Amino acid sequence: MDVVSDAISAVRIGQPSSNRLRVGGTWCTRFAPYEGAGFHVVLAGGCWLLPDEGGEPVTLGAGDVVLLPHGAGHVLADGPSDTARAVPFEEMRRPEGAPGGREVELLCGKYRLDRSRVHPLLAELPQVVHLPNRVGSHPELRAAVDLLARELDERRPGSCLALPSLLDLLLIYMVRAWTTEADTATGAWPAVLGDPVTTAALRALHSDPAAPWTNDRLAAEAGVSRATLARRFTALVGRPPMAYLTWWRLTRTAALLRDTDAPLASVARTAGYSSPYALSHAFSREFGVTPGRYRATVRR
Protein backbone atom coordinates (compact mmCIF):
# COMPACT_ATOMS: atom_id res chain seq x y z
CA MET A 1 0.00 0.00 0.00
CA ASP A 2 0.98 3.66 -0.38
CA VAL A 3 0.06 6.60 1.79
CA VAL A 4 -2.71 7.95 -0.49
CA SER A 5 -4.38 4.53 -0.78
CA ASP A 6 -4.13 3.94 2.96
CA ALA A 7 -5.37 7.42 3.83
CA ILE A 8 -8.52 6.81 1.78
CA SER A 9 -9.12 3.18 2.76
CA ALA A 10 -8.79 3.97 6.47
CA VAL A 11 -11.83 6.28 6.41
CA ARG A 12 -14.00 4.87 3.60
CA ILE A 13 -17.11 3.07 4.83
CA GLY A 14 -19.99 1.65 2.84
CA GLN A 15 -20.50 2.48 -0.81
CA PRO A 16 -20.74 5.88 -2.46
CA SER A 17 -24.11 7.12 -3.61
CA SER A 18 -24.85 9.25 -6.66
CA ASN A 19 -27.70 10.84 -8.54
CA ARG A 20 -27.92 12.27 -12.01
CA LEU A 21 -29.37 15.76 -12.31
CA ARG A 22 -30.55 17.29 -15.58
CA VAL A 23 -31.94 20.79 -15.27
CA GLY A 24 -32.38 23.91 -17.37
CA GLY A 25 -33.70 27.44 -17.20
CA THR A 26 -33.34 29.31 -13.93
CA TRP A 27 -32.47 26.99 -11.06
CA CYS A 28 -30.70 26.89 -7.70
CA THR A 29 -30.32 23.87 -5.41
CA ARG A 30 -28.80 23.46 -1.95
CA PHE A 31 -26.68 20.60 -0.60
CA ALA A 32 -26.72 20.42 3.19
CA PRO A 33 -23.48 19.77 5.13
CA TYR A 34 -22.58 16.08 5.19
CA GLU A 35 -20.37 13.94 7.41
CA GLY A 36 -18.67 12.37 4.41
CA ALA A 37 -17.33 13.95 1.22
CA GLY A 38 -19.40 15.30 -1.65
CA PHE A 39 -18.55 15.47 -5.33
CA HIS A 40 -19.95 16.77 -8.61
CA VAL A 41 -19.09 15.89 -12.19
CA VAL A 42 -20.37 18.24 -14.90
CA LEU A 43 -21.38 15.95 -17.77
CA ALA A 44 -22.80 18.71 -20.01
CA GLY A 45 -23.36 22.45 -19.83
CA GLY A 46 -22.10 24.59 -16.97
CA CYS A 47 -23.11 26.04 -13.62
CA TRP A 48 -21.85 27.79 -10.49
CA LEU A 49 -20.88 26.33 -7.14
CA LEU A 50 -21.49 28.72 -4.24
CA PRO A 51 -19.90 27.51 -0.97
CA ASP A 52 -21.47 28.28 2.38
CA GLU A 53 -19.67 30.45 4.92
CA GLY A 54 -18.44 33.02 2.44
CA GLY A 55 -16.31 30.82 0.18
CA GLU A 56 -15.41 32.07 -3.28
CA PRO A 57 -17.89 31.11 -6.05
CA VAL A 58 -16.56 28.55 -8.54
CA THR A 59 -17.53 28.43 -12.22
CA LEU A 60 -17.94 24.86 -13.49
CA GLY A 61 -17.88 23.78 -17.13
CA ALA A 62 -18.42 20.56 -19.03
CA GLY A 63 -15.97 17.89 -17.87
CA ASP A 64 -15.10 19.69 -14.64
CA VAL A 65 -14.89 17.69 -11.42
CA VAL A 66 -15.25 19.14 -7.93
CA LEU A 67 -14.65 17.43 -4.59
CA LEU A 68 -15.90 18.73 -1.25
CA PRO A 69 -13.74 16.52 1.01
CA HIS A 70 -15.12 17.84 4.31
CA GLY A 71 -18.79 17.68 3.35
CA ALA A 72 -19.25 21.46 3.37
CA GLY A 73 -22.70 22.82 2.62
CA HIS A 74 -23.03 24.56 -0.74
CA VAL A 75 -25.33 25.62 -3.55
CA LEU A 76 -25.29 24.77 -7.25
CA ALA A 77 -27.04 27.28 -9.50
CA ASP A 78 -27.34 28.57 -13.04
CA GLY A 79 -25.41 31.67 -11.99
CA PRO A 80 -24.06 33.65 -9.02
CA SER A 81 -27.53 34.46 -7.76
CA ASP A 82 -29.24 34.80 -4.38
CA THR A 83 -28.83 31.47 -2.57
CA ALA A 84 -31.90 32.16 -0.42
CA ARG A 85 -34.04 30.84 -3.28
CA ALA A 86 -32.18 27.51 -3.34
CA VAL A 87 -34.37 24.40 -3.44
CA PRO A 88 -33.19 21.30 -1.48
CA PHE A 89 -31.43 18.87 -3.80
CA GLU A 90 -33.97 16.12 -3.10
CA GLU A 91 -36.63 18.25 -4.79
CA MET A 92 -34.48 18.74 -7.90
CA ARG A 93 -34.26 15.08 -8.87
CA ARG A 94 -36.15 14.78 -12.10
CA PRO A 95 -35.16 13.33 -15.48
CA GLU A 96 -35.77 16.43 -17.55
CA GLY A 97 -34.93 20.06 -16.89
CA ALA A 98 -37.21 23.04 -17.02
CA PRO A 99 -37.74 24.53 -20.49
CA GLY A 100 -35.64 27.43 -21.66
CA GLY A 101 -32.04 28.35 -21.00
CA ARG A 102 -28.99 26.16 -21.22
CA GLU A 103 -29.49 22.63 -19.99
CA VAL A 104 -27.00 21.29 -17.48
CA GLU A 105 -26.33 17.66 -16.66
CA LEU A 106 -24.49 16.66 -13.50
CA LEU A 107 -23.54 13.61 -11.54
CA CYS A 108 -23.83 14.50 -7.84
CA GLY A 109 -22.79 12.13 -5.10
CA LYS A 110 -21.38 11.42 -1.66
CA TYR A 111 -18.73 9.22 -0.08
CA ARG A 112 -19.28 7.92 3.44
CA LEU A 113 -16.27 8.59 5.66
CA ASP A 114 -15.32 7.80 9.24
CA ARG A 115 -13.87 11.10 10.43
CA SER A 116 -12.68 9.84 13.81
CA ARG A 117 -9.16 9.07 12.47
CA VAL A 118 -8.72 11.12 9.31
CA HIS A 119 -5.21 10.97 7.88
CA PRO A 120 -3.50 14.41 7.85
CA LEU A 121 -3.23 14.19 4.05
CA LEU A 122 -7.04 14.25 3.79
CA ALA A 123 -7.48 16.62 6.74
CA GLU A 124 -5.60 19.41 4.99
CA LEU A 125 -7.55 19.23 1.74
CA PRO A 126 -9.32 22.55 1.10
CA GLN A 127 -13.08 22.85 1.45
CA VAL A 128 -13.45 22.78 -2.35
CA VAL A 129 -11.11 20.98 -4.75
CA HIS A 130 -11.91 22.13 -8.29
CA LEU A 131 -10.32 20.14 -11.11
CA PRO A 132 -11.08 21.85 -14.44
CA ASN A 133 -11.30 19.89 -17.66
CA ARG A 134 -8.01 20.94 -19.22
CA VAL A 135 -6.76 19.11 -22.30
CA GLY A 136 -3.98 16.71 -21.34
CA SER A 137 -4.45 17.32 -17.62
CA HIS A 138 -4.84 14.19 -15.46
CA PRO A 139 -5.75 11.77 -18.27
CA GLU A 140 -6.74 9.03 -15.81
CA LEU A 141 -9.28 11.37 -14.17
CA ARG A 142 -10.66 12.32 -17.57
CA ALA A 143 -10.92 8.64 -18.50
CA ALA A 144 -12.84 7.89 -15.28
CA VAL A 145 -15.26 10.73 -16.01
CA ASP A 146 -15.80 9.43 -19.56
CA LEU A 147 -16.40 5.90 -18.29
CA LEU A 148 -18.89 7.17 -15.72
CA ALA A 149 -20.81 9.13 -18.36
CA ARG A 150 -20.90 6.11 -20.67
CA GLU A 151 -22.02 3.78 -17.89
CA LEU A 152 -24.79 6.17 -16.94
CA ASP A 153 -25.91 6.56 -20.55
CA GLU A 154 -26.14 2.89 -21.43
CA ARG A 155 -26.88 1.10 -18.14
CA ARG A 156 -25.41 -2.14 -19.42
CA PRO A 157 -25.35 -5.45 -17.52
CA GLY A 158 -23.13 -5.17 -14.46
CA SER A 159 -23.77 -1.45 -13.92
CA CYS A 160 -24.69 -1.99 -10.27
CA LEU A 161 -21.12 -3.13 -9.63
CA ALA A 162 -19.39 -0.91 -12.18
CA LEU A 163 -20.77 2.40 -10.93
CA PRO A 164 -19.61 2.14 -7.26
CA SER A 165 -16.21 0.92 -8.44
CA LEU A 166 -15.86 3.84 -10.85
CA LEU A 167 -16.91 6.27 -8.13
CA ASP A 168 -14.24 4.85 -5.80
CA LEU A 169 -11.71 5.24 -8.61
CA LEU A 170 -12.87 8.82 -9.11
CA LEU A 171 -12.12 9.64 -5.46
CA ILE A 172 -8.59 8.28 -5.76
CA TYR A 173 -7.95 10.26 -8.93
CA MET A 174 -9.35 13.46 -7.42
CA VAL A 175 -7.09 13.23 -4.37
CA ARG A 176 -4.12 12.28 -6.54
CA ALA A 177 -4.76 15.24 -8.83
CA TRP A 178 -4.81 17.60 -5.87
CA THR A 179 -1.51 16.28 -4.52
CA THR A 180 0.17 16.90 -7.88
CA GLU A 181 -1.38 20.33 -8.53
CA ALA A 182 -1.26 21.87 -5.05
CA ASP A 183 1.81 23.76 -3.88
CA THR A 184 3.40 24.06 -0.45
CA ALA A 185 1.31 27.17 0.25
CA THR A 186 -1.81 25.00 -0.05
CA GLY A 187 -0.70 22.32 2.39
CA ALA A 188 2.19 20.26 3.70
CA TRP A 189 1.39 16.95 2.05
CA PRO A 190 2.15 17.93 -1.55
CA ALA A 191 5.66 18.70 -0.26
CA VAL A 192 5.74 15.43 1.70
CA LEU A 193 4.88 13.36 -1.36
CA GLY A 194 7.34 15.33 -3.46
CA ASP A 195 10.28 14.59 -1.16
CA PRO A 196 12.00 11.33 -2.18
CA VAL A 197 13.41 10.56 1.27
CA THR A 198 10.15 11.06 3.17
CA THR A 199 8.16 9.30 0.46
CA ALA A 200 10.48 6.26 0.61
CA ALA A 201 10.08 6.08 4.39
CA LEU A 202 6.30 6.42 4.21
CA ARG A 203 6.09 3.78 1.49
CA ALA A 204 8.07 1.37 3.65
CA LEU A 205 5.94 2.01 6.74
CA HIS A 206 2.66 1.68 4.86
CA SER A 207 3.78 -1.38 2.93
CA ASP A 208 4.53 -3.32 6.13
CA PRO A 209 3.42 -1.49 9.29
CA ALA A 210 3.76 -4.67 11.36
CA ALA A 211 7.50 -4.98 10.67
CA PRO A 212 9.87 -4.32 13.61
CA TRP A 213 10.82 -0.87 12.39
CA THR A 214 13.53 1.22 14.02
CA ASN A 215 14.90 4.60 13.01
CA ASP A 216 18.09 2.95 11.76
CA ARG A 217 16.27 0.36 9.67
CA LEU A 218 13.93 2.98 8.19
CA ALA A 219 16.85 5.29 7.39
CA ALA A 220 18.57 2.45 5.55
CA GLU A 221 15.37 1.82 3.59
CA ALA A 222 15.28 5.50 2.59
CA GLY A 223 19.00 5.51 1.75
CA VAL A 224 20.00 8.30 4.15
CA SER A 225 21.45 8.68 7.63
CA ARG A 226 19.24 8.41 10.68
CA ALA A 227 19.72 12.12 11.46
CA THR A 228 18.78 13.16 7.91
CA LEU A 229 15.66 11.03 7.94
CA ALA A 230 14.56 12.31 11.35
CA ARG A 231 15.11 15.93 10.32
CA ARG A 232 13.34 15.77 6.94
CA PHE A 233 10.51 13.46 8.02
CA THR A 234 9.68 15.45 11.15
CA ALA A 235 9.85 18.81 9.37
CA LEU A 236 7.49 17.70 6.58
CA VAL A 237 5.12 15.24 8.27
CA GLY A 238 4.94 17.05 11.61
CA ARG A 239 5.98 14.15 13.82
CA PRO A 240 9.01 11.81 14.05
CA PRO A 241 8.97 8.57 12.04
CA MET A 242 8.30 6.23 14.99
CA ALA A 243 5.55 8.49 16.35
CA TYR A 244 3.91 8.47 12.92
CA LEU A 245 4.22 4.66 12.80
CA THR A 246 2.49 4.30 16.18
CA TRP A 247 -0.29 6.65 15.08
CA TRP A 248 -0.75 4.75 11.82
CA ARG A 249 -0.75 1.33 13.49
CA LEU A 250 -3.52 2.43 15.86
CA THR A 251 -5.47 4.08 13.05
CA ARG A 252 -5.25 0.83 11.09
CA THR A 253 -6.34 -1.07 14.19
CA ALA A 254 -9.45 1.11 14.48
CA ALA A 255 -10.33 0.39 10.84
CA LEU A 256 -9.89 -3.36 11.35
CA LEU A 257 -12.08 -3.30 14.45
CA ARG A 258 -14.73 -1.35 12.56
CA ASP A 259 -14.70 -3.29 9.30
CA THR A 260 -13.85 -6.89 10.22
CA ASP A 261 -14.71 -9.61 12.74
CA ALA A 262 -11.06 -10.60 13.17
CA PRO A 263 -10.19 -11.63 16.75
CA LEU A 264 -8.06 -9.22 18.74
CA ALA A 265 -5.01 -11.50 18.53
CA SER A 266 -5.16 -11.36 14.74
CA VAL A 267 -5.68 -7.60 14.74
CA ALA A 268 -2.67 -7.21 17.05
CA ARG A 269 -0.41 -9.21 14.73
CA THR A 270 -1.59 -7.28 11.68
CA ALA A 271 -0.98 -3.96 13.41
CA GLY A 272 2.49 -4.93 14.63
CA TYR A 273 1.84 -5.59 18.34
CA SER A 274 3.29 -8.60 20.13
CA SER A 275 0.10 -9.51 21.97
CA PRO A 276 -3.54 -8.46 22.43
CA TYR A 277 -2.52 -7.01 25.79
CA ALA A 278 0.15 -4.78 24.23
CA LEU A 279 -2.33 -3.58 21.59
CA SER A 280 -5.06 -2.98 24.15
CA HIS A 281 -2.72 -0.91 26.31
CA ALA A 282 -1.61 1.29 23.39
CA PHE A 283 -5.13 1.55 21.97
CA SER A 284 -6.69 2.55 25.29
CA ARG A 285 -4.04 5.20 25.82
CA GLU A 286 -4.78 6.72 22.39
CA PHE A 287 -8.57 6.28 22.15
CA GLY A 288 -9.58 6.30 25.80
CA VAL A 289 -11.46 2.97 25.45
CA THR A 290 -10.48 -0.68 25.04
CA PRO A 291 -10.50 -2.22 21.55
CA GLY A 292 -13.52 -4.37 22.48
CA ARG A 293 -15.57 -1.41 23.65
CA TYR A 294 -14.54 0.60 20.60
CA ARG A 295 -15.66 -2.19 18.27
CA ALA A 296 -19.01 -2.52 20.05
CA THR A 297 -19.59 1.24 19.77
CA VAL A 298 -18.73 1.76 16.10
CA ARG A 299 -20.60 -1.35 14.92
CA ARG A 300 -23.93 -0.70 16.63
Image (cartoon, rainbow, N blue to C red):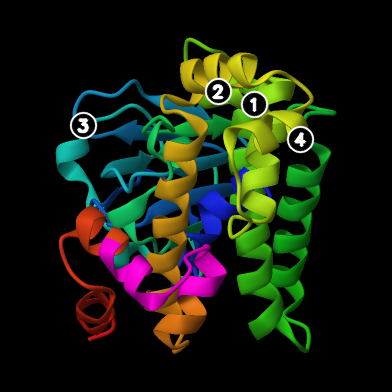
Label 4 is placed on what type of residue? Answer: Glu
Asked if disc 2 and disc 1 are in contact, CB closer than 8 Å, the reply is: yes
Q: CA distance from mark 3 to mark 4?
A: 56 Å
If you read the primary sequence from the N terminus, does the residue marked by circle 3 or circle 4 appear first?
3
User: Can residue 14 be seen by looking at this rendering?
Assistant: no
Quadrant (top left, top right, bottom left, bottom right) of the N terminus: bottom right
Mark 1 lies on residue: 198
Q: Earlier in the sequence, mark 2 or mark 1?
A: 1
Q: Earlier in the sequence, mark 2 or mark 3?
A: 3
Q: Which residues are magenta?
A: 268-281
Residue 237 visible in image? yes
Q: Which residue is mark 4?
A: 221
Question: In the figure, is residue 88 to the left or right of 153?
Answer: left
How far apart, in angstroms, are the residues tagged by discs 2 and 3?
47 Å
Task: Examine the image and state in which quarter residue 63 appears.
Answer: top right
> Is residue 69 highlighted in magenta?
no
Residue drawn 40% across the image and 31% down it: 124
**Residue 43 spot, x, y in % from top left:** 64, 50
